Amino acid sequence: MSAGQGPSIDIVAGARPNFMKVAPIIRALETRRAAGGHLRYRLVHTGQHHDARMSATFFAQLGVPAPDVDLAARSGTQAEQTAAIMVRYEQLLLARPCRLCLVVGDVNSTMACALAARKVQLPVAHVEAGLRCGDRTMPEEINRKVVDAVSDWFFTTSRSAGENLVREGVEKERIFFVGNTMADTLLANLDLLRPPPVWHELDLSPGAYFVVTLHRPANVDAAACLARLLEAIAGATRGLPVVFPVHPRTAATLGAIAGLSRTIHPVEPQPYLEFNHLVRHAKAVITDSGGVSEETTVMGVPCLTLRDGTERPETVTAGTNEVVGSDPAALDGALERLFAGRWKRGGIPERWDGRAGGRIAEALEALVPP
C-alpha cells in the first residue's frame, strides 16, 4: 500500500486457495501502478488459515507481499470464525476505510468480509463468482450464493458461471468473464516446481503413484467414513504408492484409524511448488477439491473427484476431471479405465491463459476511478 495515502481497494485473503488467487491480481496491479495506474491496494489476511504450512509458505513461494493487515481471526466453528472475521473487518473499515472490497473464492473469509463491507455501504467485487454445484450441504456453496447475493461486480472463470448469475438476476453489465487466476498462478510457476522430501523418501517416479487430497466434512469428519474411503482407494490403485497430504482438519480423524494400508502415505500439507510437482507427475489425482481439479486440468493430469457434482463443470467438459460420485465403490470402474489407458486427454478451458489477473486489474481501474 502506498505510504501516506488510503487504499483504493481491499484485497481479502484468508485461506490457502485464496493466496493462489490473489497473487496474479496483486502482480497485475503493481505492474499497472508502476506504469502510472492509480489504484492502491491493501492486502487483508483474515487469519482463517494461520498455520505456516497453509499460509506463510504460500506467501513466500508465490511472491505475495506481507499482508498490510492481519485480522487474526483464527479457527473455530463456522459461525465463530465468520463472526470474528466480520467484527474485525468492520472495525478496520470504520477506522481506515477504502473504496471497494475485492473478495476471492468461497471460503468463510470471503463471505464474512463481503457481508461486513456491504453493511457499511462499501461496494464488493467477487473473483470466481457464479460457481454453483447445487449441493447446499456444502459450506462453500452457501458462501458462494451469499457472496454473490450482496456483490456489485462479478469476475467469472467460465461462461457457465456468468449464465448462473444471469439466471439469478444479475445484470450482464456487472459480469466480467476474465478467466482463472488459479491458472495464472500455476502457469507462472510451472518451471519452478520442485520435488518435496517425500519424493525421495518413497523413491517416487513419474506416473507410478497417486496423489489424494480430502477435506470435505462428509469425507473426513468421521473416522469410519474416512477409513472406508482410504480402504477403497488402496484397493483400487493396484499397490502403487498413494501420497496423502493431510489437511489439518483431517489429522485427528486419521489418527483414530487403525490398520491403514501400507500403500497410503500420509504427509503434512505441502507448499505450493512441492504439491504441484507431485500432482504434475502423478498417474492421477483423487480429490474432493474443486481447486485441485482446476490444477490437474491445466497440467493434463487425470483427476477423479469424489463428489456427486462440481461447481467447475469446465474441468469435466474441457479438462481431465471426472466426477465419480461420493460412493467409494465407484472408484473401481474409473480406475480400471485409467489403468487401461482409456482416460480422456482433456484441454485448457477458455481464457485459462495466464492473463486473468491483468483483466481484473484493468476492470478495477475502470470501476474505481481516481
Image (cartoon, helix red, strand yellow):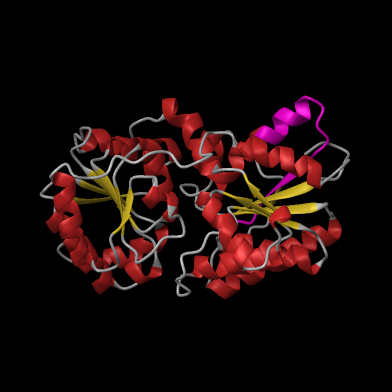
Residue 175 in the image: x percent, y percent? 67, 53
Residue 143 in the image: x percent, y percent? 57, 67
Question: How many circles with numbers are drawn on the protein?
Answer: 0
Please indicate whether residue 55 sits to the left or right of residue 201 in the image: right
Please indicate whether residue 171 sits to the left or right of residue 182 in the image: right
Give the image quarter of residue 72. bottom right
Residue 259, above or below 267: below
Residue 60 in the image: x percent, y percent? 54, 36
Residue 39 painted magenta: yes
Residue at 38% from the left image edge and 50% from the top image edge: 317
Q: Is residue 84 visible?
A: yes
Residue 24 painted magenta: no
Give the image quarter of residue 66. top right
In the image, 140 versus 15, the foreground residue is 140
Q: Which residues are magenta?
A: 28-49
Residue 296, above or below 50: above
Residue 339 in the image: x percent, y percent? 14, 45
Give the image quarter of residue 226. bottom left
| Screen quadrant of the N terminus | top right
Residue at 74% from the left image edge and 30% from the top image edge: 32
Residue at 78% from the left image edge and 58% from the top image edge: 123
| Screen quadrant of the C terminus | top right
